[in-house]
Image (spheres, rainbow, N blue to C red):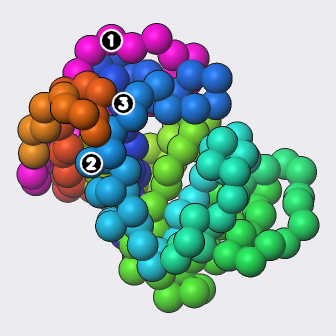
Amino acid sequence: MRISFIVAKAENNVIGINNQLPWHLKADLQMFKRITMGHHILMGRKTFESIGKALPGRVSLVISSTPRPVAENVLWFNSIFRAIKQAERSGETELFIIGGEQIFKYGLSLVDRIYLTEVKGNIKGDVFFPQLSMKSWNKISEQHCLKDADNDHDFSMVVLDRRNR
């Protein structure tokens, strides 16, 4: 099973503010939906709460020290490793880690691929993506997008694969 990050970050590594995204990028949200549909998505409790519900067509694996009631397509775990094992047991081919900051830090050594939306500019925020060492990653693809009525910043959608493990 491949383990991947899917994340949008500003040039200063900001990924959120006040438990929300600090931008609106319709093209990025469409890409997120297209890539994650039908897969397991792994996230921390705060990320799950910011979304507010299970995303349709996906199984949400939520990491929290406090177990919650089971809901349809939402499974709670107290360990990232237990959540990963659950996805493997379910026959998942690609598990997507979608945040937040602590989960990205814990998962960085585990991922093989990063679907990275690079938002142009330094944006105010209180949640950050860990610093990547680009010498550890190969750029597989890159698509540049300009600010328009549906996207409030210029941005690039990049796919990175980890170099030899």
* Residue 31 percent across, percent down from the top left: 29, 57
Query: What residue lies at 33% left-to-right and 11% top-to-bottom?
Result: 122
Q: Quadrant of residue 133?
A: top left
The residue wearing badge 1 is 122
Circle nearer the N terminus (1, 2) = 2
Circle count: 3
Q: In the rendered structure, which amino acid carries the disc numbered 3?
A: Lys
The residue wearing badge 2 is 27
Mark 1, secondary structure of its residue: loop
The residue wearing badge 3 is 9
Q: Is residue 6 magenta?
A: no
Query: What residue lies at 10% left-to-right and 53% top-to-bottom?
Result: 140
Q: Is residue 77 above or below residue 37?
A: above
Q: In the rendered structure, which amino acid carries the disc numbered 2?
A: Ala
* Residue 135 percent across, percent down from the top left: 17, 34
Circle nearer the N terminus (2, 3) = 3
Front in this rendered view, residue 12 or 165? 12
* Residue 85 percent across, percent down from the top left: 61, 74
